[in-house]
Image (cartoon, rainbow, N blue to C red):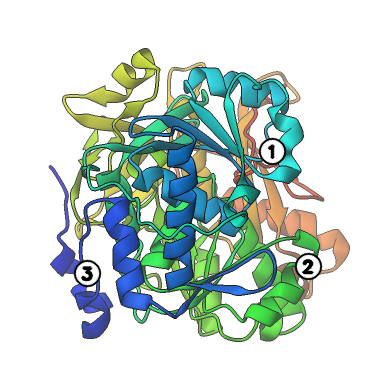
């Protein structure tokens, strides 16, 4: 069975005015003209110097950068690396690159000089744009054309130079991903794919235009790039980029964001602080939280709704320009990642989710073998175990690569069991792994990290917590097959080690 939804299926979740403002454009060049014409003198982005760039300024500065790149010999089809922190320069340089028909290669700023050198070769860079603070990371790539992001401030050039030769099917950017195998690759995304991902970020939210955003997600991550940058700009948002994690809450108080785009671990942190102190911790104006990048606990959906905040869980992949599905009715099905966004189709093959659509990547750049392995008859094999319910809402069960094969031949999805454990309000996160019993038998164990605020409200004595938690976690076995049963519970005194995207680092073995 193939599952899909149309744009009209999302109409009921928006105001009539907002829904009719979601109009299609074909390329990033058209995107720039669109946001300039629609929003003009409205504020777009807080610049590094504290001033606010309007949409007219954004258009003019991006045009200016495009002229600089042209003068340096950048042309359509060139691969141009971008090594920058989250800021205004990142935005105008990547938009300018793509609007010339060149390919913007997004390089995470935490890379070291050897990694920058290696990726410059892998992605066959013609030039590397870098922020001055990151110049030391370019030490090994001196044979490349190097462009300092400060150059756009040197002179004024008014001539519009955006290419009218860019097509929807042309490549636009490369974003790093672990893909389905965990091996670092670069997903090559077309203009059409990026635009579709950007529009998908507008569906399912009432009153999402002209809002203030506080941006924390790295722009080199597809979630930050598509939903926190491009969808924000498409809807006329005003974006403030976090400059210093230590100043985050001071900045939030100043910006008073109306929409936050964050991962579950950060949503958990915010919720704990709100409960410990006051709702004003987030500035008092948040209307929507868009959450993804990892599994979202139903607890977060329900608790934020109690605070009057619409909490939208979703599912995305770098290979699909981030936005695959979203749940516009979180309270109805908090365990679901919702409906597939328009212009794509999904089906389940042997338990695995396969997708295809306009927001699908072209290939893994310069990696023919990985590309071949990722596709079958035009469908992308996500590597995610999933199911659709009777309403065609999507549920993610786990990753194929994380499946534990027991000695008796049974396959266990630890993420599925973790989802069941995480439905307990006092569990913040969990990790199911293989272990051995005292007698040397193979068993499954669950490490759990508790929500201290919920445990404290239960009035348990310190010596009672371990027995209570162990009992409740083991009761989850009643919802599982015999071979999935948890035999051992370990309570952690600190959070799990996590990736930069805040996903738990999952060990292959614990023994």
Q: Are marks 3 and 1 in contact (CB under 8 Å)?
A: no
Q: Is residue 215 left or right of residue 209?
A: right
Q: Residue at x 43, y 66 (%)?
A: 232
How far, Cα to Cα, is label 3 from label 2? 37 Å
292 is higher (above) or lower (below) than 270:
above
Residue carrying label 1: 110
Helix, strand or loop at label 2? It is helix
On screen, 107 above or below 454? above
Numbered disc total: 3
Position of the N terminus, as image quadrant, is top left
Is residue 143 in sight in this rendering?
yes
* In contact (CB < 8 Å): disc 2 and disc 1: no
Left or right of 127, for residue 6: left
Q: Which residue is mark 2?
A: 247
343 vs 57: above or below? above
Q: Give the residue drawn at x 43%, y 26%.
A: 411
Q: Quadrant of residue 7?
A: bottom left
**On the picture, is 281 further left or further right than 324?**
right
Dot 3 or dot 1: first in sequence order is: 3
Q: Position of residue 26 (x, y in %)?
A: 21, 53
Disc 3, disc 2: CB below 8 Å? no
Residue nearest the observer in this picture, 463 or 227: 227
Circle 3 sits on which residue?
10
Residue 401: x and y in percent read 47, 26
* Residue 38: quarter of image: bottom left
Question: What is the C-alpha distance between the residues marked 3 and 1?
Answer: 38 Å
């Amino acid at each position: 069975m193939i599952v899909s939804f149309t744009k009209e299926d999302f109409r009921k979740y928006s105001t009539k005015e907002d829904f009719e403002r979601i109009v299609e454009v074909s390329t990033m060049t058209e995107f720039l003209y669109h946001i300039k014409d629609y929003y003009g003198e409205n504020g777009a982005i807080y610049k590094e110097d504290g001033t606010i760039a309007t949409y007219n300024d954004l258009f003019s500065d991006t045009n200016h950068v495009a002229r600089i790149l042209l003068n340096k010999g950048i042309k359509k089809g060139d691969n141009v690396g971008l090594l920058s922190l989250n800021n205004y320069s990142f935005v105008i340089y990547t938009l300018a690159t793509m609007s010339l028909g060149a390919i913007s290669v997004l390089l995470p700023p935490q890379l070291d000089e050897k990694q920058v050198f290696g990726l410059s070769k892998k992605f066959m860079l013609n030039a590397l744009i870098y922020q001055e603070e990151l110049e030391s990371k370019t030490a090994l790539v001196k044979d490349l054309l190097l462009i300092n992001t400060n150059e756009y401030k040197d002179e004024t050039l008014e001539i519009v130079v955006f290419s009218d030769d860019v097509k929807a099917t042309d490549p636009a950017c490369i974003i790093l991903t672990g893909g389905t195998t965990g091996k670092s690759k670069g997903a090559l995304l077309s203009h059409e794919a990026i635009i579709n991902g950007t529009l998908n970020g507008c569906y399912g939210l009432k009153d999402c235009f002209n809002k203030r955003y506080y941006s924390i997600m790295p722009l080199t991550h597809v979630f930050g790039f598509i939903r926190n940058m491009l969808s924000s700009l498409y809807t006329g948002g005003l974006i403030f980029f976090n400059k210093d994690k230590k100043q985050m809450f001071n900045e939030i108080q100043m910006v008073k964001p109306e929409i936050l785009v964050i991962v579950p671990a950060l949503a958990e942190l915010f919720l704990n602080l709100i409960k410990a102190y006051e709702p004003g911790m987030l500035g008092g104006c948040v209307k929507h939280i868009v959450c993804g990048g990892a599994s979202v606990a139903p607890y977060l959906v329900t608790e934020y709704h109690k605070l009057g905040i619409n909490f939208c869980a979703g599912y995305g992949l770098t290979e699909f320009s981030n936005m695959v599905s979203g749940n516009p009715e979180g309270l109805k099905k908090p365990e679901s990642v919702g409906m597939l966004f328009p212009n794509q189709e999904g089906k389940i093959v042997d338990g695995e989710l396969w997708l295809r659509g306009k927001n699908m990547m072209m290939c893994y750049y310069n990696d023919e073998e990985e590309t071949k392995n990722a596709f079958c008859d035009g469908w992308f094999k996500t590597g995610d175990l999933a199911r659709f319910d009777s309403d065609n809402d999507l549920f993610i069960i786990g990753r194929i690569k994380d499946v534990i094969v027991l000695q008796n031949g049974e396959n266990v999805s630890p993420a599925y069991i973790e989802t069941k454990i995480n439905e307990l309000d006092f569990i913040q996160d969990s990790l199911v792994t293989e272990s051995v019993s005292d007698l040397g038998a193979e068993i499954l164990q669950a490490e759990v990290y508790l929500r201290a605020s919920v445990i404290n409200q239960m009035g348990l004595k310190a010596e009672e917590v371990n027995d209570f938690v162990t009992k409740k976690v083991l009761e989850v076995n009643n919802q599982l097959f015999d071979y999935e049963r948890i035999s051992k519970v370990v309570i952690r005194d600190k959070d799990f080690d996590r990736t930069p995207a805040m996903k738990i680092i999952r060990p292959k073995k614990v023994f």
